[in-house]
Image: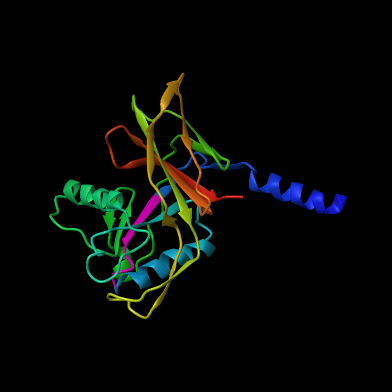
Amino acid sequence: MRYFWGIILLALVSAHAETTLRSGPQRVSLLELYTSEGCSSCPPAESWLGGLKTDGRLWKEIVPVAFHVDYWDDLGWKDRFAKQQYTSRQRAYSTIWGSSSVYTPGFVLDGQEWKGWFSGSALPVPGDRSVGKLEVKVDNRVAKIKYSGDSGAKELEAHLVPMAMDVNSDVHAGENRGRKLMHSFIALDLVSRKLTDKNGEFTAELPFDYTAAKAVGIWVTEAGSIKPVQAAGGFLK
């Protein structure tokens, strides 16, 4: 009986174990994929993104996030992961780039449109520029964010995305009807918060209560900018 309760106690402690993720001083790139379960040309892009799970650059050089947009939802199949917030984010990029349209699959690398996936090009190597260190400590209720280093900006914002991994979807309508889709790095939410400057160390706390999250991505931008200064991420314990 004591052994039984010991196992239960260990499980409870493990469930509440703190995860600490750090970027290091070198620049880490943010790779965003805009996708939809209603888009027949998106599964290959998502499969490629999922392949980053076994890439040695994951989290060290690249933080991938898949944002499911909602503008396909009225065309036969409603994507359960889609949010209008993600569509608005993609449209904001499009406006910045001087484009009048959005599309899926669409990749964004460090705030710039990246079409290398379509031609089979390798991801560019992040620049050698040293930037500040980004850290996030996550338990099952709170994410504590800290950025230290000279960013050159007076105000910084943190953006946090809890992500689901290895999720299957059976699609029954639309362009992918009859297909079983596999998703990874799925954005479950996107929460932003202004960082507080404490003698050159920028900090913030965000609520974190996402039972389906298996990984987390975080990046820092200058206030009002969409281009990341530094990024970090990793799998949750």
The residue at the point 22 percent across, 47 percent down is 92
Dividing the picture into quarters, in which one does residue 177 lie?
bottom left
- Residue furthest top in the image: 199
**Residue at the bottom extreme of this rendering:** 178
Q: Quadrant of residue 72?
A: bottom left
Percent coordinates x, y for residue 195 in the rendering: 41, 29
Q: Nearer the viewer, residue 185 or 27?
A: 185
- Where does the magenta region start and end? 30-39
- Residue drawn at x 57%, y 43% is 140
Q: Residue pushed farthest front?
A: 1
Using residue 151 as the reference point, say whether residue 94 is left or right of it.
left
Q: Is residue 212 left or right of residue 81?
A: right
Pick the front one: 173 or 23? 173
- Residue in the image at 43% along x and 36% along y: 131
Q: Is residue 8 left or right of residue 18?
A: right
Answer above or below: position of 28 versus 105: above
